[in-house]
Image: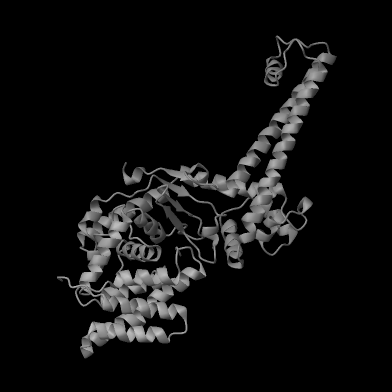
Amino acid sequence: MSHLEIPVVSVEKAKGFDSLHIFAVEALRDYRKSLAKNQSSREQLERYHELADSKKLNFAKHRRLRAWLKLNELQSEKYAPSQLNDAIERSDKEVEITTDRLSGELDTFREKHLKKYSPMAKQRFQELVFANGMPSAVMEEYQRGGAESIVDWLAQETPGGEGGATDEQLAQLLEWNIEKTEEIAQNPEIIRTLTKDYFDNIQQATDDGRLHPDWRQETARVDEVVIGDIFDLRFVGHNDKVRGGSYSSEHKNLVVWPYEPGDEPLSPHIFGHEMTHSMGGVGRGWMNEAFTEKFASIIDGYDPVDSEFATYQDGQDVLDSLVQNAPEKLTYFDISEHYIGDDKEKNEEEVRKLFKRAYRGYDVLGTAIEIGEAVAPGTVINGTEKETDMVSAIHHAVTEIMLPVFQMIKESNIHPTTAARGLKDLADKQTNQTDRLMYVHCAQMFANKEDINV
């Protein structure tokens, strides 16, 4: 499959999505179907009585009425009014059931989704729905209610819309959102253009010697590009961290949210970052994100060390510090050879070897990884304060401990084992557990230098 043939689908049709608002929209559609069926049933019953009263009830001539009777499991020769009324009662019960289901789904959506929005996410969501043309009827009701935040208005359940959105108003906005994703998926010019530009830029980067030539033959592991929805917490600012795209290696889909106000609804760089994830990767969360940002910047035509994009900045700074201060030459071109491919663990092993050779036997990248795992075991890239603290600790260990000691060894001819003992002594004096762990792991690295041929 050509990269330009990657299917573009709405969030409702994507693989692996289990979203609360999609359940609510499905419940709304079931409710409307049952309501329409009920209305049709009543119309047919009324027609039956009208014809019966006028003594014109000839089933041979009234095909729609025969069809309705059959649909409701009634025989045309047994058209007693009681049977017809029973069918109406069944239809009424169906409307009642679907109404209750819709109300339950919307209550769940309010509790488990809307009430999680931070103040920043509320403000961002409001700007996005206004900019993307939310239904005018819902807009008018919101403005009439006088609520400061549309998220707060939607999250309330006040009968009649006095101070809060009704079930129907919330459901209408959710359905509008789903329909908007479908509209974009049916007219995916923006996605096609960004995809073509991305792979054209890879070709240029390899021609210029900024990326390893193997990138030309690498295939993006994307089975579908998913048009995400405006309600998604990741997009509006989960933990006050906004994401414009997301890649899932499990489902092999790339989710984008092309709703930003202005002339560029979807950032080419964000699209490129997520597409770069699909080309390969390097092991751990923070390091994988930092390397991905580096190569996405190269593909965009920027100097990887002087890019204007500050995403995952501490992680990028760790890599830049290690690359720029290596005793032996090390470049992002060298590393790019080992980023591509679907075996991230193998890629990480090869990249660690590159850094170890550049640092003449010291496992600097492995030590950075170990510090992260020691400071915050099991932490992944999820925008939490714990993750930020972990990467900050790695950054501090590399720039304030590891690299200064390398400089001392170089300038003062200190033996590595002496440096290791000094770091161990400093570790014993630390009262903060994170600081102690940083010194301990740095000490172990200098004590365990490997003899390798550079």
Query: Residue farthest to the bottom?
Result: 412
Residue occupying image coordinates x 65% and y 41%:
28
Q: Give x and y (percent) for residue 218.
A: 27, 51
Q: Splitting the image into 4 quarters, where does residue 366 fall?
A: bottom left
Asked if residue 46 shows in the view, the reply is no
Q: Quadrant of residue 449?
A: bottom left
How many labels, in total? Answer: 0
Q: State whether residue 358 is above or below residue 173.
A: below
Quarter of the image for the C terminus: give it.
bottom left
71 sits left or right of 447 in the view: right
- Residue 391 at x, y = what percent? 42, 72
Residue 78: percent from left, percent from top: 77, 12
Horizontal side of 48 relative to 261 (left or right) equals: right
The quarter of the picture where the N terminus appears is top left
Residue sitting nearer the eye, 127 or 353: 353
Display coloring: one colour
174 left or right of 264 in image = right
Please name the residue shown 77% across and 26% down the image: 88
Q: Identify the residue at the far left of this view.
A: 453
Q: Is residue 112 visible?
A: yes
Instruction: Using the image as rendered, state which of residue 36 and residue 98 is in the foreground.
Output: 98
Q: Position of residue 8 (x, y in %)?
A: 43, 44
